Image (tube, rainbow, N blue to C red):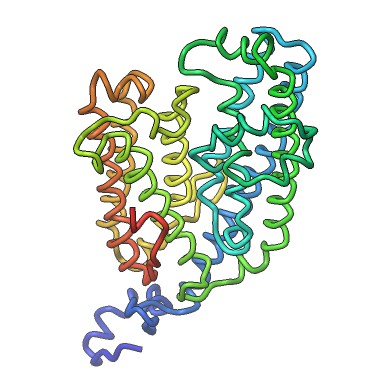
Amino acid sequence: MLHFNKKILIVFSALLIITSSLFISCDDKGVTEDRYQIEYYRTAQLKNIYNNGIVTLTDTFGQEVIQLKESINNLKQTTTLNNLVSAQNNWKDVMKTWKQLELYNLGAIQNSFIHFEINRWETNTSLINDYIDGSDAINETYVESKGSSAKGLSAIEFLLFSSENNQTVLNTLTTALNSQRRLDYLLALSENLEKKETKLKTLWTNSEDTFLNSLQNGISGSQNQLTNAMVSLIEEIVISKLGKPLGEKTGGIISINSLEAYRSGFSLEIINQHLIALEKCYSGNFKQNSIKWGYDNYLDLIGSITLNEKINTAFANCKLKIEAVKNPLREELINNKQNVAELRSSFTNLLVLIKVDLANAIGSTITISDNDGD
């Protein structure tokens, strides 16, 4: 407890009654706060993220995966343009939810590598074509035996979309060589995706107690893991999802094929969904009429109100830069590269605020991610 002389105690007695429970001790990172108050806020934040974020997203993801499988089965039975469009729309629905859920790759979920099984990009199109052109029976068991680069959501996109037109896709599923095996592989992919979705839900159910009760400030603490997950995702956006297509490693030579989901023209929407997930994780604002515990409350607790304002401004700027892109990224890179560069810059600014300023303020330890060496 901080010591005050008698005169100061008299002047500020009313204030101390309100705030004495807050300013008691220092944690191991030098943040002067009462340990119990900190744990209370962390618990509230983690419960909000788990119950209103992770659980809701996994439930929605499961429902949409089933719908996708059904639409692909309909496409296999009746291979028409209308059924193709229906399957494509279901794939987009799944991707929107997954690109929010993808943020929460931590703890036992990260150690299981199931995120790679659900969506790994770039997908290995050569391998997929080899499997389709082969003679082995194609079913879910066959797909399960293959590596993550030949299955999951990116593999489904490869078979459902073309950067040319839908008639081109339909031809590969009707009149092209091995078109029936292509449909078989597509259906098997959707069945395998459903299997992985079920496993993901089980992993999260089994991890609930660990996630909610890991209140420590070290690298195994859940808040620390969440902070690292945010950093890792923003780095992936900056380095891989925008930097590589912009040609930042190739002397400015644009690479359309380096965009995630360029065939479907869904690259920008993926980044938008990432941003939605990041902002909800930060603010705790998952749904209406609920207590929205988040990092912002935590920063207010430790007196970092200005930093909170800067981070909120950075999120708003990222959103504005996304809205400024009026075409699919594959077109914007060619027609208005500056817009894409400014979008990347906005996420770079957000990255610094989360990785350096936020982490320092709350005492998080940022570990090396897969993106650091890119």
Picture coordinates of residue 79, whole percent (x, y)? 72, 11
Determine whether 97 is above or below 302 in the image: above
Picture coordinates of residue 186, whole percent (x, y)? 69, 27
Determine whether 351 is above or below 142 in the image: below
For this orientation, the residue located farthest to the front is: 135
User: Which is nearer the eye, 264 or 357?
Assistant: 264
Residue 43 placement, left or right of 361: right
Determine whether 250 is above or below 135 in the image: below
- Please state, as top left, top right, bottom left or bottom right, where the N terminus lies in the image: bottom left
Picture coordinates of residue 258, whole percent (x, y)? 38, 34
Query: Which picture quadrant has residue 297?
Result: bottom left
Picture coordinates of residue 362, whole percent (x, y)? 37, 68
Residue 42 placement, left or right of 297: right
User: Which is nearer the eye, 26 or 240?
Assistant: 240
User: Which is nearer the eye, 361 or 25?
Assistant: 361
For the point 41% across and 60% down, the residue is 369
For the point 42% across and 57% down, the residue is 370
Query: Which picture quadrant has residue 83?
Result: top right
For the point 35% across and 28% down, the residue is 256
**Callout count:** 0
Residue 333 placement, left or right of 47: left
For the point 50% across and 10% down, the residue is 165
